[in-house]
Amino acid sequence: MNTLLRSIVSGWVLSVLFAALPLNAHAQPAAKTAPAKAAAKLPIKLIVLVPESYDFGDDEKAETKLWLFDELMDAKGTRREFTTQPLDVGKKYFYKLKMLYEPNNYTKITRRLRYGNMEPGKTYTIDLTKENPKLKDDIEVRWVPTPKAVVDIMLKLAKTKKGDVVYDLGCGDGIIVIAAVKEFGAGRGVGVDIKPKLIEEAKAAAKKAGVADKVEFRIGDVLKKVDDIEKADVVALYMGEDINLRLKPILRKRMKIGARVVSHRFKMGDDWPPEKTVKHKHTDGDSYFVHLWTIGPKDKAAAAKTPTNGKE
């Protein structure tokens, strides 16, 4: 049964639909001989912490969005306070939260959380700045083409050679694995992308380049469905720091010693700095950075201590 609640944010009032549902909907009834008493009522206060979205500049800041039971809230900022209308003391309530934020200008992350056993009269702080281990984030990455000059730098920096197996996670139109096979002599190329249309474009490009028999393009989530990454000699990335951080323990744990990882623009966090970075001044006037890591014994040891988010 939906309940209309009132939300107070920074001292001003928002009328919102919270739809709070009592977990203990069947309360113990009073004895028939006792006179009925009015149930005590108190509000619940929620303090929700959310990450800050990317600032596009020119007054185009993407404000992090927050929903309570599918109701989009009007609050802004990284700390958002909501106070419900008075609820029955003695009953317990739950809420469902959904958040959408943009850590950069082409990555969107949706995060969900369900929390129960809330009691009227109490304050609860909910931290949505960290991923919920039970409800994994949904990540959408807008495809941005990699300039051919940057592709060549990535493959050269990775020392791509004859016979290598090259994987491109988030392959887009397939330009990296096609170049690896056709121009650098790689024995096999594998591209993975979650968008079927891009996979079809990559297959068509491979056929046109005459390397369709040496490359494979798959539809899939790079955090979950790369079961044979152990075969890779080179892994290429260009998807955003958030995904790199999630991939880091997977790559360090499952790639073989001596395998190389190259990433256009994005790094892997402070605890795994790149061994080399190349800066390229492109003809469009922008500067491009390519980072290199080589898997070593220390990476294996570090990965053994870190849980992975991907499929084992």
Image (cartoon, rainbow, N blue to C red):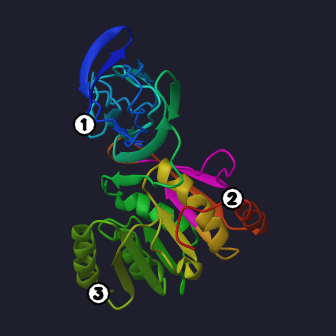
Q: Residues within 10 Å of mark 1 (few under 14, many from 20)?
A: few
* Disc on the earlier residue, 2 or 3: 3
- Regarding residue 265, the answer to whether it shows in the image is no
Distance from Cα at disc 2 to Cα at disc 3: 41 Å
Name which quarter of the figure residue 146 lies in: bottom left
Q: Is residue 232 left or right of residue 70?
A: right
Q: Nearer the viewer, mark 3 or mark 1?
A: 1
165 or 253: nearer the viewer:
253
Q: Which residue is mark 3?
A: 210
The kind of secondary structure element at disc 1 is: loop
The quarter of the image holding the C terminus is bottom right
Q: Nearer the viewer, mark 2 or mark 1?
A: 1
Q: Residues within 10 Å of mark 3 (few under 14, many from 20)?
A: few
Identify the residue shown where x is 32% and y is 27%.
Answer: 61
Q: Is residue 40 left or right of residue 5?
A: right
Name which quarter of the figure residue 25 lies in: top left
Q: Amino acid at mark 1?
A: Asn
Q: Amino acid at mark 3?
A: Gly
Q: Which residue is mark 1?
A: 2
Q: Which residue is mark 2?
A: 306
Q: Amino acid at mark 2?
A: Thr
Rendered location of residue 106, percent (x, y): 33, 46
The kind of secondary structure element at disc 2 is: loop
56 or 290: nearer the viewer:
56
- Regarding residue 295, the answer to whether it shows in the image is yes
Q: Is residue 163 left or right of residue 72?
A: right
Q: Residue most toward the top? A: 11
Q: Nearer the viewer, mark 2 or mark 3?
A: 2
The residue stretch that appears in magenta: 261-281
